[in-house]
Amino acid sequence: LRQAFIADGLAVGLRVAVQALDRRQALLCLLANDIDQEGYSRLVEALCQEHHIPLLKVDSNKTLGEWAGLCKIDREGKARKVVGCSCVVVTDYGTTGTQAHTVIEGYFKGID
């Protein structure tokens, strides 16, 4: 996600993420399991299924917010003041030859 963040390829937040999903610009969708409104998660899941976009669920919205870069990093390299995020959509991976990108692609190929 850091490479996608650098390449300005993240749609962070529910409204922007749903717009990217509806426009079929999304390559990958990450959804937090602890969303307040159940209708939001059903909407995102339905859009991902309809447009055949891989969906990955994350346990906590704080974890997803940290992954998306919605935090401050202190001198020790630990995340501070993490803002929760319900949904993140990757629209551009940035560099695709990384080990993390290969692992994610292999995970979704194994599911299909």
Image: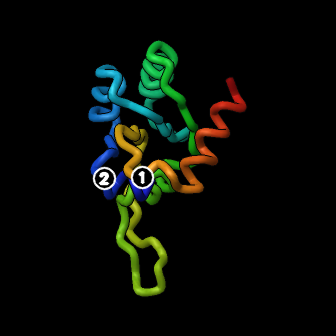
- Residue at x 44%, y 30% (from the top left corner): 37
Can you give x and y, in whole percent of width and height, for residue 93 in the image? 41, 46
Give the SS element for disc 1: loop
Give the SS element for disc 2: loop
Could you say which disc has been placed on residue 53 in the image? none
Q: Which residue is mark 2?
A: 7
Residue 106 lies, with reference to residue 100, above or below; the image says above
- Residue at x 49%, y 39% (from the top left corner): 30
Q: Are marks 2 and 1 in contact (CB under 8 Å)?
A: yes
Residue 89 lies, with reference to residue 70, above or below; the image says above
Give the mark nearest the N terminus, 2 or 1: 2
- Residue at x 42%, y 26% (from the top left corner): 40
| Image quarter (top left, top right, bottom left or bottom right) of the C terminus | top right
Tell me if mark 1 has few (under 14), some (14-19) or many (20+) residues whose alpha carbon lies within 10 angstroms of its own. few
Q: In the orientation shown, which residue stands out farthest toward the bottom?
A: 75
Q: Total marks drawn?
A: 2
Q: Amino acid at mark 1?
A: Thr
Q: Which residue is mark 1?
A: 95
